[in-house]
Amino acid sequence: MKCKFTFKTELWVPVYTGIKVDSLKDFINAVSIIPDGSLLYHFYINLLNYHNIPTLYMNSFAYWLYINGYESLAEKISIIDPTEHYSLDALRFLLIEALKEHADDKVKRQIQPFYFLDVRREVLFTGLEATDLQALVEGVRNSSIYSIFYHMVMSKIDRKSPVDEYSEWLINSGYAKKAEKVAEIDLYAMNLYDVKLKLLEVLSL
């Protein structure tokens, strides 16, 4: 029996959590209590918006630390690649552990406030389906970058699986080598348009 791939897409609506901090100590305390959606937003929004922050710091946590003078801490936070994780608990733990090293910072700084945002996610069916490799290729070609984001990133978190949905379908359909190549795509190093092109290249080989 052929495996069916159902193409979905993802929409985000940011909402304010009501949590605002203006010190590193309060920031560290807030990270342990913010909702999972806030972690999603601040770690992934730059990837979803194809790297729109004009800085080397790839998530808004690191960027905020950088503009407030915590350069070394910003670098530690910026190297956390959220696309390597499918557990938000694990991601929160890594963030807290990195922040703990500076919990006793005594330097008085003029701090710009950080507003923690949450996200309301909506996963939508696109109407596209595939039961063979060629149809999968065509489906990816006709998909938006937000669909790519859902299947490559968010589906792992939703299913608590280390394997993205494209790779899972490829494995189940007998294309294990292609699945390995898809899994090797560096999502954090490219914008989603380039990820889509690379995905099509791998699938079409």
Image: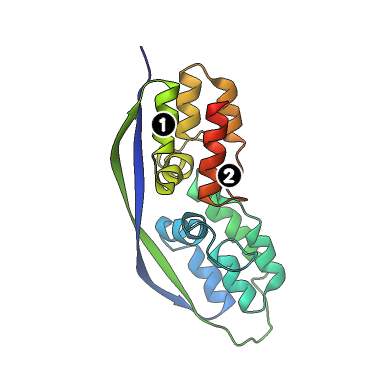
Please say if 30 is above or below 137.
below
Q: Position of residue 174 (x, y in %)?
A: 50, 16
Image location of residue 183, percent across then percent down:
58, 34
Labelled pair 1, 2 in contact (Cβ < 8 Å): no
Residue occupying image coordinates x 63% and y 61%: 77
154 above or below 51? above
| Residue 83 visible in the shown view | yes
Reading the chain from its start, which is encountered first: label 1 or label 2?
2
Residue 21 drawn at (x, y percent) = 49, 77
Q: Quadrant of the C terminus?
A: top right
In this rendering, would 21 be left or right of 184?
Answer: left
Q: Residue at x 48, y 40 (%)?
A: 152
Secondary element at image label 1: helix
Q: Of all residues shown, which one is farthest toward the right?
A: 72
- Pick whichever, 19 or 68, lies toward us: 68
Crowding at mark 2 (Cα within 10 Å: few <14, some 14-19, many 20+):
some
User: In this orientation, which residue lies closer to the viewer: 51 or 144?
Assistant: 144
Residue kind at label 2, given as amino acid type: Glu
For label 1, count other residues whose C-alpha is less than 10 Å away and answer few (under 14), some (14-19) or many (20+): some
Q: Which mark is residue 138?
A: 1
Q: What amino acid is found at the position of numbered circle 1 in the picture?
A: Glu
Say the numbered circle drawn on residue 34. Answer: none
Locate the N terminus and report the quarter of the image it occupies: top left
Q: Secondary structure at mark 2?
A: helix
- Tell me which residue sits at (68%, 68%) in the image: 73
Check residue 84 in the rendering and tell me which mark sits there, or answer none. Answer: 2
| Distance (Cα) linking label 1 and label 2 | 27 Å
Compared with 5, 45 (above or below) is below
Residue 85 makes an appearance in the image:
no
